[in-house]
Each structure stands twice: as structure tokens, then as C-alpha cells.
Amino acid sequence: MADTPATHASREQAAPEWRAGEWVADDGLDRIEYGIFRHEAVKPSMTFPTIAEAEEEASRLNARIPANPILVLVCGPPGSGKTTLAHALASEIGCPAVVRDEIKEGMAHAVRLAGGTFEAGPGDVLSVRTVHVFSDVLRVLLTADASVVAEAAFKDHLWRYVLEPFVDRVDVRIVQCRVAADVALERVRLRPAETPRAAHAVAEQMHDSDRWNRDYEAFPRLALGSPSIDVDTTAGYEPSLVEVAAFVNRPWPA
């Protein structure tokens, strides 16, 4: 039957309506106390659950589910294969990967869309912002009891700064990516052609192999005292991706 003005209006009046329940604060998180209720368009009037039904549903939604989130830190100097391994490991485990460089690239993209300009360099404004956003994203996920793989080319002191708000409340696994300095340098030199990164400056050391080798070998790796595994990323992964995932999932102390 074709729509008439009358039937069209009646359908508009019968559009589903939503009622939001009361929101309550619980340990810093917003949780639904009474939920959201919707009446069906075919019903002539709004219907709501009884008080007892609403309280039963609230108890179910707010019930604490035992959880033990794992924070996997994929670490190492530039060119050591961290980002590729972080995404592969997150896929193998079944959890999100939070990559510092990708957050900064997203910020640079937003600047370009707004018609702004940005010049990447040591200590640039987006680098500083990214450190705090990276930390905040990890905190939100871990507070929600979600395991997460985090990757960044941070040195030990910067990793500790990022992790300070929550590191004592989660289980940490450290994955140290290792590769020869000359292999890492070749990877860094190939990046601009393979995957242009507007938010990242070209490392000065890449033009001086001797300086690169010295800085690479002296790179201060994260040393928290948490369970740690070294992974050679020269050609694939040694130990294998499956073995690294098993390391992450293993209860500690083993």
C-alpha cells in the first residue's frame, strides 16, 4: 500500500523511542544501573520491566567478571622489527595492538585535513602529545580488563614514565626485538620508499653507519624485571610466533 500523508505521519509517531537509565559512577567507570529500554514500534504504548527485573538485569551487567589482563611490551631500537611483530602477536593472542608511531601518524593526518602544517623532528609537538595519548590508551584498555600489545621505540626511562600510572596493577610481559645493527639500518633506510611516514623525521644516524652502530648497540632497553623473551626478527621470528604467544599466555612465575 502506498504511503499517504496520514499513514506516513502515523509511522513517524510509532518510531521506536529509547529511554536511558540512570548512570552511576563505580570506581571511576560509568556503569549502567537500569539499562536502556526500548518499546517495539508495533506496540501501542511504552513497556518497562518491573523494578525487580530491572535490578536483576543491573546486577548481571555490573557483576565483576574475574579477569587477568596482560600487558605485552614489544621493545627495541628503531628497525628491530617491533611493529610487524606487535601486530602479528596481537592477532595470534587475540587482543588489540597499540602502536605509538601509528597514533602519531593519526595526529599528523588530522593536522593535514585541517589544512595545517607539521614538521617532524626530535621533540616535536606531536611526539610529546603522543607519549601521553599512548599512556592514556593503555590505561583505559587495562582498566577495562583488556589484554593489550603495546609497541614503541622508547628507551628504558621513557617506557617507565609511560607505564608508571598502572604498571604495578597488571601482569607485564616484555618482548625484546633483536637484529644486527646493519640489518636494522637497512630497514630504516628503506622505510621512506616503502611506507612514507609524514609524522616521522629521518634519523640523522642513518647517513652515518658508524654512528648508527654505536647508538644502536648502546640503546638502553627496558629492564623492568618482568618476564622477558628475546626474539630475533632477522628472517621471520626465532623463537616462532606461536612460541612467543605461549610465553605471553604462560602463568608466571612459571
Image (cartoon, helix red, strand yellow):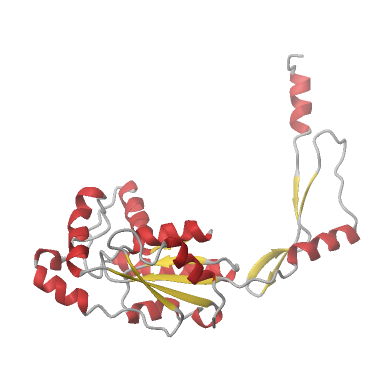
Between residues 83 and 16, which one lies in front from this camera angle?
Answer: 83
Q: Would residue 148 be found to the left or right of residue 63 on screen?
A: left
Q: Is residue 212 left or right of residue 61?
A: left
Position in image of residue 115 (x %, y %): 29, 47
Q: Front-most of 124 and 203?
A: 203
- Picture mark count: 0
- Examine the rendering and report whether any part of residue 192 can be seen: yes
Which quarter shows the N terminus? top right
Residue 145: which quarter of the image? bottom right
Q: Residue at x 22, y 69 (%)?
A: 180
Q: Is residue 7 left or right of residue 232?
A: right
Q: Is residue 17 left or right of residue 228?
A: right
Q: 38 or 226: which is nearer to us?
A: 226
Place residue 183 in its image quadrant: bottom left
Q: In front here: 11 or 55?
A: 55
What residue is at 85 percent from the left and 43 percent from the top? 46
Residue occupying the point 14% across, 68% down: 205
Residue 139 appears in view: no
